Image (cartoon, grey):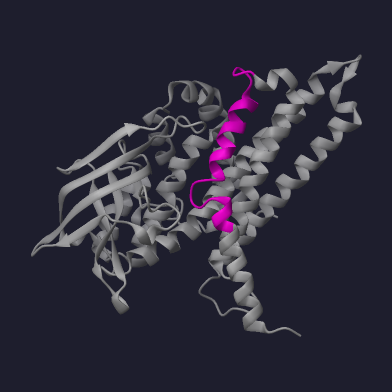
Amino acid sequence: MLTAEQQAIRELARDFADSEIVPHAAAWDQAGAFDRDVLARLGELGFLGMLVPERYGGLGLDLPTYLVALEELARGDAALALTVAIQNGPVPAILLAHGTEAQKARWLPDLASGAKIAGFALSEAQAGSDPSAMTTTATAEADGWILNGAKRWVTNGASADLMLVFARTGEGDRGKSATGAFMVDTESPGYRAGRREKTMGLRASETVSVDLKGVRIDGDRLVGNRHRGLSYALEALDLGRLGIGAQAVGIAEAALRHAVRYAHQRRQFGRPIASFGGVRSKLATMGARVAAARALVMEGARGWEARNAPGVGDELPVTARSAMAKLIASETATWAAEEAVRIFGGYGFMREYPVEKLMRDAKGTEIYEGTSEILRLVIGRALGAREAAIGTP
């Protein structure tokens, strides 16, 4: 059950999605971009700083409440929700957990208001699922750092104002390469966004490559320990995966609603197709699986909120819980969208009907922030570790 605050936030997000997102989603998909103005309106409502404390201009919501809102926005348009998730999730989370007070005061208010849009640059051509293999470097100077390298699949890489860039800073503990996290202005000399990728779904979301050639930044742009940036990124991915889980549930919910509405309107053999057992069974299974995915995302959120509290010995770690939530939610979104296309029949294959877009968008949630295959490895490793810890009866 949702609390009164969560219900209020959900209604606000739902109203915004229905009035400001849904009417434009198809046009944004066709144009390959959403209006920057919609981000300004989201910022005015506080939806770009939901997890940022009030003292920095945010709403200071807990994670479950944020995910409730994100699901509603994703139901309107998953591409826009992806930018909202990045703005709310990994970048401010790393600043809050590891930044100095000066860094928080400098950047969090602008991120929360939408005055500055953030990006997250971790992956590289040969370092996607294995970020430790990155080759981008940060060379220390007397008064700062010089960044060189290339990042791939960067959301908002050309339109963001601030980019959180991860780069190797030399050798860390036990001879392993160390990684730092750096806040970079995208207008810095040497920062260049490459051509925009043509994606199957989420077309309104900008995905580009980013080249960093001699980008000079001041020393205060390093967030946290110069050797622990990779661990910060992995922490942020746990949070990010819950956000993508909520995004996927929003897509699945949209598919379910369209399928139910169409099944009651579409008539064959003199009656609505919703009256046929085969269609009714599809709708029932869709509803159950969407509810189950939503519950798993919320369970992962509660685990995240309690991550620093004393735990029970047989509890799975936050990383595994987040992986489970994203895995099930993303695969449910793809399955539900496919079922909706089948219920629409030939119309489902047509661009002017909404479920075709949902099917394309859903597939992306199975890939970014960890593919389904990687997530299964993460979950399997955690289950093995738990079994070893608690022992076999």
Determine if residue 9 is in view. Answer: no
Residue 130 x/y as whole percent: 42, 58
Residue that protrudes farthest toward the top in the picture: 270
The residue shown at (58%, 51%) is 372
**Residue 164 vs residue 327, the one in the foreground:** 327
Relative to residue 376, is residue 274 drawn left or right? right
Residue 60 x/y as whole percent: 45, 57
On-image quarter of the N terminus: bottom right
Q: Quadrant of residue 287?
A: top right
Residue 185 x/y as whole percent: 22, 46
The residue shown at (29%, 76%) is 175
Q: Quadrant of residue 157?
A: top left
The residue shown at (37%, 43%) is 154
Relative to residue 257, is residue 58 drawn left or right? left
Determine if residue 70 is in view. Answer: yes
Residue that protrudes farthest toward the front in the picture: 126
Taking the magenta stretch, the answer to whether it contains residue 387 is no
Q: Is residue 151 above or below residue 137?
A: above
Taking the magenta stretch, the answer to whether it contains residue 365 is yes
Q: Which contiguous range is marked in magenta?
A: 350-375
